[in-house]
Image (cartoon, helix red, strand yellow):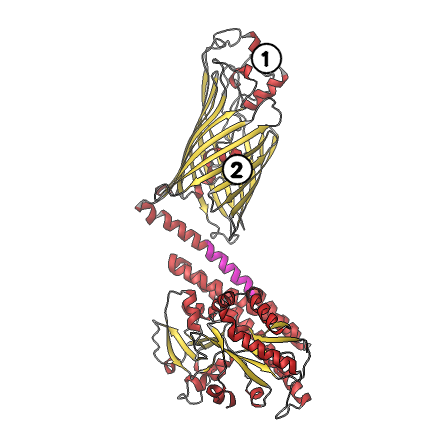
Amino acid sequence: MNTFREKMKTTRLRQIFRQAALFLALTAGDVVFFGPGLEAYFLDFASGVRPHGMGEAFVSVADDANAVGVNPAGLGRMESIFLSGMYSDLFTNLNASLFSETYDRLAFNSVLLAMPIVSLEGSIGLGWTQFNSTLYKENVVSMSYGKKIWDPHTLDLGIGCSLGATVKLLHWMVEESDMTANPGFYPYAERQKYGATLDAGCLLEMWDGISVGMSVDQLLPVNMGISTTEYVPRIHRAGVSYLKKFKGIILASLLAVTEVSERNNIYTPKLGIESQWWGNVFALRMGVNPENITGGFSFVFQELDENMGLQLDYAWSYPWQVLDTLGSHRVGVTLQWDITSPEIDAKYRKAVEVARAATSVTRNVAVAREAVKAAKKAAAEAGRAADSEDLEGVKAAVQDAEANAQTAALSAAAVREIAKEHSENLLLKAAEAEQAAQEAQQEAKQAQEVYSLLIKQQQDKQLQASGFPERAPYLPEKHPDKIVIGIERKIFADYGDLHEIMIRLDPLKKHLEAAVNMEVEWKWYSTSELELALQAGELDMVATYGADLRKYYRNGLIQPMATVLRDYKDTQQCLLITCADSPYTQAEETRNSRLGYPNDMLLQKMPGYFFANVPHFQAETFFASIENFTNAREALLALQVGTVDVLVDFEYVTHIHKLLRLPNDIKVLASSASVPNTPVFARLSRNKNKNAQMQVLGETLKNCHTQQKLKGILNYFGIDRFADFNEKKHKNCLLK
């Protein structure tokens, strides 16, 4: 006994047992085992394997049963039932001479339960933790409650808040042994003490995966001494975590956490990181703090049955100041049940869905508002650029305004769908978003009008300067060593932004370059820009369905090379469509309705296409409102949510409707005569070699569907193949 006691007085063992909390009760009263001032009771042990693997930096995470011991506010976010158990072996291989059959190793164990309760509008937690050795034990029984006070949608700040509290029953006990039987060594009759205290926590869900957590342990003072007053020290924790999720790669998410805890004016920084892989099946963890370096991993076995999953965890830590040890090892198991009771399905899950929907609504409304501001700024910039006849400046401003208008429209459509599905209380938000979308669209329309006017003015100036002949053999040529193809942007407007489209078309571009042994360059234009570029000699070939190139064809300046087949047809019709449940059955009935259109040419053709029987038809007076959209996708969404009543577009809009899988079907009120389906024209050149290479390029286009990789590109854009342009079939259309 004396030998054992003398060993415990050495400096190295004082450090060891300060870390291990061995025989902490023996510091009470006059028996000072490790020297004055050492805190004896209930050291700040993280409750579970996962927090320990992250350096005990967990207060801002708290998203499983470990919230009971670290931050009870995390219970407010629970949507599943968690049951966790842990066993740990502390300071493995620590100087074996200290341990025997009488004095065994040190362990820290826990069992934790977290469970949502609908009737309580939150979650409860239960926990038992124990520090264990032969001579000394500490037990903590916890009862917790956490509730989400508000979701991010409740405040315009977009911040969610959860609060929680834990009632803890504390107990320590010194086991009867030859040491406690010696009055000179342990002079007290009591060998155990009970106490109770309270913990509290707060968890804030910020923006873009950021969470902030705070907690206080021993908020109420608790005296656990025997002969003297010995309060368990209060512990303050504060931390920030950042969660980044990834798509399309095996790394599912990355969680970084930083935390500071304070105990008796000693501040302890903690850092942790967790990465989840393969759909969260496997996780790696690392952490560091002034006492330990830690690491760990977990495997998740999902679908043990329909609603239950199993997670196995391991954590290891190595103390900076303790030698002769292999570190501490913790293993744990967690069962997770999805909530499937009828009561919770009917109430709790619905409440969660509505809360999430409301969060999404608030964000979308905010996006729409910002889009309006940006659209107004862009429209103003377009006006300033037009005053100085800066065509490129106006063009950039128009594109910016249209992009913001589209953003606002999509946000408004999303809000309307969410409101209809989840809660009528959100319909006011939907109306607010739609109003913002209309304002943004109006700003974009004004910018487009400025742009169109400036283009028309410049076209008139160029025509006056060049004296455009009735039948000119060639247009000016500016680049003899490459083939420049002008493409109308609206052809691909429904398939993503321009950068994404160019990436997808790049293999086709390289295939064409290899065939003609010349550089091939794509250039993208609006309908009005395309004709201007052709007139200026910027283009060798054009692909369009909206530009009016008839005068160039009549004067022999361009010749057709190919045409697109969609649904194996080389023609398309202009359609006037509405929702299937609309009361309209024919075009004339749409008077005073709201019209949407994605193409200016279609608006000009409407009198002849659909309203020949309406005297002096003018769209501006026939319809209650007219709204221009960037693409068919945007126009269809507006039709779905009721922003417009009817749409005019090419037949291809029905294909986009199928791709979007929209809930409401559409019906055709009227259709026009057939027109060529996206023809490709070549401009004649004085360079005979270049003319021949353009012929080769046309033939290559018509055969690219035979290449499997290129066929996939065509199919992505809704194109079956390129085919010969039937001049005889379309001659009247081109010449009239």
Real-space Cα separation, disc 2 to disc 1, in angstroms: 36 Å
Location of residue 142 in the rendering, given as x and y in whole percent from the top left corner:
43, 30
Residue 56 in the image: above or below residue 570: above
Q: Can you tell which quarter of the image residue 196 is in? A: top left
**Does residue 379 appear in this view?**
no
- Residue 7 is tagged as 1
Location of residue 497 in the rendering, given as x and y in whole percent from the top left corner:
55, 65
Location of residue 445 in the rendering, given as x and y in whole percent from the top left corner:
54, 74
Q: Name the residue type under label 2.
A: Phe
Q: Which secondary structure, mark 1?
A: helix
Q: Residues at badges 2 and 1 in contact (C-beta under 8 Å)?
A: no
Q: Which of marks 2 and 1 is in front?
A: 1
Location of residue 496 in the rendering, given as x and y in whole percent from the top left corner:
52, 65
Q: Which residue is drawn at 36% across and 47% down?
A: 348
Residue 508 in the image: above or below residue 239: below
- Residue 70 is tagged as none
Q: Is the magenta stretch mostly helix, strand or loop?
A: helix
**Does residue 684 appear in this view?**
yes
In front of the other: 542 or 711: 711
**Residue 364 is one of the magenta-drawn residues:** yes
Which segment did they paint magenta?
359-372
Q: Is residue 507 left or right of residue 582?
A: right
Residue at the outermost bottom position: 470
Q: Can you tell which quarter of the image residue 292 is in? A: top right
Circle nearer the N terminus (2, 1) = 1
Look at mark 2 in the image and give the residue it sits on. 58
Residue 208 in the image: above or below residue 414: above
In front of the other: 479 or 12: 479
**Residue 27 is one of the magenta-drawn residues:** no
In front of the other: 57 or 474: 474
Q: Name the residue type under label 1.
A: Lys
- Say how many tags the image has: 2
